[in-house]
Every structure is written in C-alpha cells, then in structure tokens.
Image (cartoon, coloured by chain):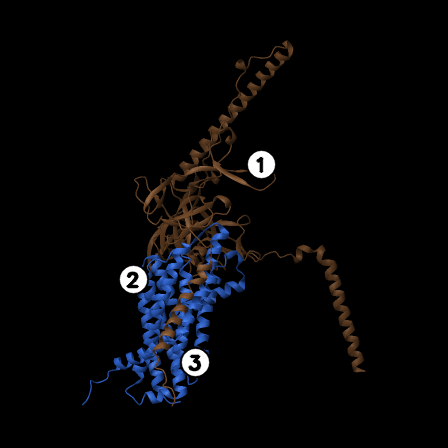
Amino acid sequence: MRRKRLGRGNRLAALGVLAGLGLALAWGPAAGTAFAAEPVKQRQIVYGITTWTGKEFAGTFAPANADTIYLTASTRHVLDVLETDVYYWPITQEYMADWMGYRRVIPGRLEVLRGDQVVATLDRAPYTFVYPEGYMGGEVQLAVGEEAHEAYRRYQDAINVYYDQAEAYRQAEEAWRDRMARILEEVQRTGKPADPEKLPKAPEPPEPPRLLVMQPAEGFVVQLPAGEYTLRLVGEDGKEVEAARKELEVFAPRRTGVGYQIIPESKWTMPVESGDPAEALYVSSETTFYLKAFAASELNRYAYSRMLELAKPLAGSGQRSAWQWVLGEELGGVTLQVLQGGQVVATAEPRPYYVEQTPGYALGYRIVDFDPSRPEFQGRQPSFVAFKVQLQLRAGATYELRLVDAEGKPVPNSARTVRAVRGDPAWPLYAWPGVPLVAGLVVAGWRRRLKPRRPPEA
Amino acid sequence: MTGAPITRGHVALTIAGRDLRSHLFGFSLYLAVSLVLLGVSHFAMRNALWQVEQNGLIVLGSPISYPFFLAMWLLTIYLGLMAAVAIARERDSGTLEVLFYGPVDGLSYLAGKFLQPVASFAVVMLFYLLYFGVTAAYTNLGFPGQVLQLLLLSLALAGCVVALGLAVSALSRRVFISVLVFLGLMLFFTLFDVAHAVLMAIPGERLTDLLAFARMVVDSTQQVMAWISPVEYYSRGSAALLMGERSAYLVALGSSVLYTAVLMALAAWIFQRKGVRR
C-alpha cells in the first residue's frame, strides 16, 4: 500500500518536472534576454594604462584585482585613474571596462613612492600621439604639455590647408570640365578636331597630409628607472584615494642589441625574427632575402605580458623565469655589410620593394625594385623597405652580416653569421659514431693479446 | 723494513686507476658512446638539417649545442648509473667487506669510486670533440663557441651526477633498488626540463586555465629544481656563456662543484652509517 502511494507520488513529481521543462523550453526562447549571458558589471576605480612597447603605444587597464602595474624602465608611459564599470568576459578570459557606459576621471595628484619616500608627484598633463607618416606609417611620437596642443594645431592647420586645396581643386576641375565640354561641342559643331597642344591640362588633385595627430587628452606621464614602487592618488581634499593604491614594477631589459626581421624571397609573407645576437641564419636554398633592422631588447616575459595585458588574469602566468626578445623601433642611418673571411664582399642600403603577383591563375609573385617614377607604380606604395641580401651559396659557405653607422663603425650586437648547411650525403653522420666502436674493438683485441696464455695442460 | 705510509689519496687513486683500467679496457664504454652518438646523429643532427632543408632559411641559436648537451647528458646518466651500481653491488656480493680489511676506509673508497667515472668522462670527451668537430665542419652547422668552458661545465655536470649516483648507491643495499632510484631521479630531471620548455613555449592565446595552472606550478617548482637538478646548473652556466656573463658562469660552475661536494659528503655519511656488511 505504502509502495503504491509512493509510486503515485513519484509519478506526480515526474509529471511536475516534465511540465516544468516544457514550460522552460516554451518560455526560454521568447525570454531569451533573461537567460543571456549578460556580464555582471562592477563599478571600480581602475588605472588606464598606455604603455610604450618599444615600437608603439598600446593600451590596457588595471582592474581593481590587479595589484601591480608593470612598465618598462626609462621610457614614457601614460597612466590615468578613472572610475568605470568592469566586467569579466569569459570568452577571451579578460576583464573589460565599459568606457562608453560610464567613465569618470578621479581628480587628484599621482604620487610615486619608493619604500616610504615620495620620489615623484605628478599632475595630469595634456598628451597626444603624433604619427608623422600617418597611422599606418609606423612611427609614433608622444607629445606632452604645450607640445601636444601645438602638434594638434599643426595637424588641424594641415587639414585646413588640405580642405582649401581640395576646394580649389574641385573648382578648377569643374572649370576644366566646362571648358572641355565647350571644346567638345565646338568639335561636334565644326567637325574639325581640336589641336591637342591647345587642350587645357587637367588640374592635379592635392595630396592629403600624411601627418596624423590625435586630439590631446590628459593623463599622468610616467618615466622611471627600474625598481619597485607604489602608486597612490591624493585627491583634491588632500586625502589618499584608497582604491587607487597600486604596486608598480618598472623593469629593464636584460640585454639589448639589434634584431632583424628576415624576409625570405620565397616566403615574403612569413618573415622570421632574430633578436638574440648569438643566433645565426642557417640556409639551404634561400640565396636572396631581405632584412629589416630594429632596436631589440630582451625582457622578462612575465613582466612584459603583464604590462601589455594586465586585464587578462592569465597573461604571463608561469613565465617569471622566461625571457623574450622584443623588436622595437626600426633603425635608420645604417648600412648593411656582408663579410666573408673578415673581408667586406657586399654592402646594401635600405630600399623600397614591391611585391607583384605573376600573371595567370597560378599562385606566384615577384619582388621587384619599387621605382615611384615608373608609370606602373603611380599611386602605389612599396610593399616593404629593407636591405636586400644576395649570396652565392655553396654548401659550407659562411658569411657574416653586420650593420655599420654613418661613420662606418660596426653597430654593437648587430652581427649575424649566415651558414649554408650540407646534409647530403647523410652517410658520414652515421659513419662517425662508429669510431669509438672501432677504438673499443682495437683496445679489447690488444688487451686480449696482452693476456698471458694459460700453459697447455700436461 | 717498513714502506712509506699509505695515504688516503694514494688508496683513492689506486681504486680509481684499477677501475678506470678495467673500464677503458672493456668494450661497454665504447659501445655506449657509439650508441649515444648514433642516436644523436639520427635524431638531433639530421633533424636540425631537415628543418633547414624544409624551411630554406631558419634562425637558430646553435644547432649543435642541443645535440652536444644530449650526448653529454646520456653519457653522464650511463656513468652515474655505473656509480649507483658500484657500492651496492660490491656490498651485495660481500667484496666490500673484504676490501675494508686492507688500508681502505670510506672516504678513500668513495673518492676512488668518484674519480673513476669522472676520468672516464674526460676520456670520452675526446671522442665527443672529434665527432662534433667533424660533424660541425661537414654540415657547417658551426661548433658552439667557448668549447673549453662548455667542457668544464660538462665535467662539473658529470661530477654532480656521479656524486648523486654514489649517494644513492651508499643508501641502498640492493643493486636493483639503487638502479631504480637513480634512473627514476634522472627521468624526473629530464622530463621536468622538457615539460618546462614545452609549457614555456605555448603562446598566450592558446593558454587554457589548466595549462596556465600547470605552467605556474612548473615555473614555481623550477625555482626549487634550480638547486636540486644537476641539469639546471649546466643550463645556467651555458646561458651565462651565451650572454657573455663571466661571473654568472663562474657562479654556475662553483655551485655545481659545491653540489658535488655536498652529495659526496652525504654519501660518505650514509656509507659510514650503513657500514660495509651486507
């Protein structure tokens, strides 16, 4: 009897669960937003961080749970203390700031402490990024203070001049079209072709300015020698903003030198990098390649990763003992020398090159000299600018590459050895390990001969 | 008529010389060296050449450095294993007790057992130099710079591993246990080094929670391993050579010698406590 009652109860429970599931399935899609993974936001005081990577400025931020900020030594970085809504985004495993939703600047002065001693007190200063060759041009400069406003004014002036030129061009082009239309009408009416010498020349469109300057913003510009510091924000009331206290680790490179980006002619989209001066280039078939030279520094991988991606809790995890070479700014004013047996056999200057596809459907390309005066390169940009190296390679050949400055002095840590390897035939690689074996046989045989023979039994 | 007193050093040298003669006149050492070099040729040297062949152009530190280390490490394990077997075998067979009825004591015996493998290692180094010199010249992969300093580090590494083998051997009364413990330790050191290198090479974007955790554990453990594993002393020394840091190289070399001394002292203490009887 009891069992029967329980069975009925179970059936009721099962029906209830099924009904619930059915409801959930029916209601779920309609109320999709209710189940969507909208992240939970938390209002926090964070540090906005714009760091110099050695090549460019990169942005990240320090959420409340990131205790330490990492910056490279003796270079300028920009920090700011802000209040915003922070949420964790599990897909990319990082904290994100909803800058558009809420963003408030926390007023005050930033103090940098070493131990208990204040080593720097910083006020917010206007700053901006200047791209002399445009955003894609590669070079970027940080302008601070009045220099930032001045740079931005210069940029606006350039833009205004360009707009004026563009307007003048539009008017000139309109006048030219009118004139051409009248000539055409004249030709159609009289049937006499116009004299090409007397045709008006089309106006040239103006070149847009390459210079790009961002609108100045305000922040704390930090430049410190390597060491461990503490950051604290002192509010306008003279009291410390507790939530804005962070540790600051300023780290220096372990080694510096010259790094190369090496573009093999047969794989120009897959360049290889060499930062460590102890590295060498090993070649089997590649006789032509292109080199770009950069300032390189060897940085602690953990600190460098944390500097770039502080909002990612996993960034640099487990890499405190690892080091990595980072290529920085491209080097200018240098010449590449190719040496063989200590003698310079070739030199190269950086030149522009253009990669053109070979005609037809098959894949293929050619790397050719970029000559802007030639008609086929009109309106085009070079694919890259680099030193071209062409070697006469025979197996066993060894060369040395190095940079020299304008005075002909070798640039420290710029030398790299190029070795043409030989692996064919491979049998010697298997024959040489036999030498100890032969030596062992000889020794064993010799010892056997030295052993006194047992006298024959009587 | 009485002769000159027999010193500990004399006894140690006599034991080492006797063992060295037997080792060098035997065939097993040469066979082991040949097999190691054959493996290095096939797996490491050909692999380096194959990589260059496939890519047309690659950038590497020194393709010979790793095979050189591999060859040394394998030989060191072999000699360390011989050391690990030495005391346990002689104790097990009862010859150790007989030996100690003569003018032999624990220190001179251990010193002799230490000097022999290290001397064997020095002899084998000549074969290695010949092999790597010829191979580097033939393939043009280039011989690592500062060979002498590297050889010194290698000798120090051999000293560490042999001392470790002797400590294990002194501790054990059974050859089997001694071999098992020694090989287990060597395998652990090797695998740890490989795991550390593999985990460090994983790029950030491929890092899962689990891998990140594993990397943190391995990286933290590495701080301890840096003082326990003999390989770490060699790695530190060779890295210092690459960076041209003479003082760091000397510290690595000195630490290696200290490690050997500590292990030898430990072996002597254990040997003293365990005695020579079965």
Inspect the image, locate mark 2, and give the three-letter code of the amino acid beneath it.
Ser
Chain A shade in the render: brown
Mark yes or no: residue A45 visible.
no
User: Please, which chain is the residue tagged with disc 1 on?
Assistant: A
Inspect the image, locate mark 3, and give the three-letter code of the amino acid beneath it.
Ser
Chain B shade in the render: blue
Q: Are marks 3 and 1 on the same chain?
A: no
Quarter the N terminus of chain A occupies: bottom right
Q: On the rendered structure, is A36 left or right of B210?
A: right
Q: Residues within 10 Å of mark 1 (few under 14, many from 20)?
A: few
User: Please, which chain is the residue tagged with disc 3 on?
Assistant: B
Residue under label 2: B247
Residue under label 1: A359
Residues under labels 1 and 2: Cα distance?
Answer: 60 Å
Q: Are marks 1 and 2 on the same chain?
A: no
SS for callout 1: loop
Residue A297, image x, y percentages = 38, 52
**Is residue A232 positioned above or below B32 on the image?**
above
Residues under labels 2 and 3: Cα distance?
Answer: 37 Å
Residues under labels 3 and 1: Cα distance?
Answer: 71 Å
Marker disc for residue B178: 3
Q: Residues within 10 Å of mark 3 (few under 14, many from 20)?
A: many
Residue furthest front as drawn: A458
Query: Marks 2 and 3: which is nearer the front?
Result: 3
Residue B64, image x, y percentages = 41, 59
Q: Are marks 2 and 3 in contact (CB under 8 Å)?
A: no
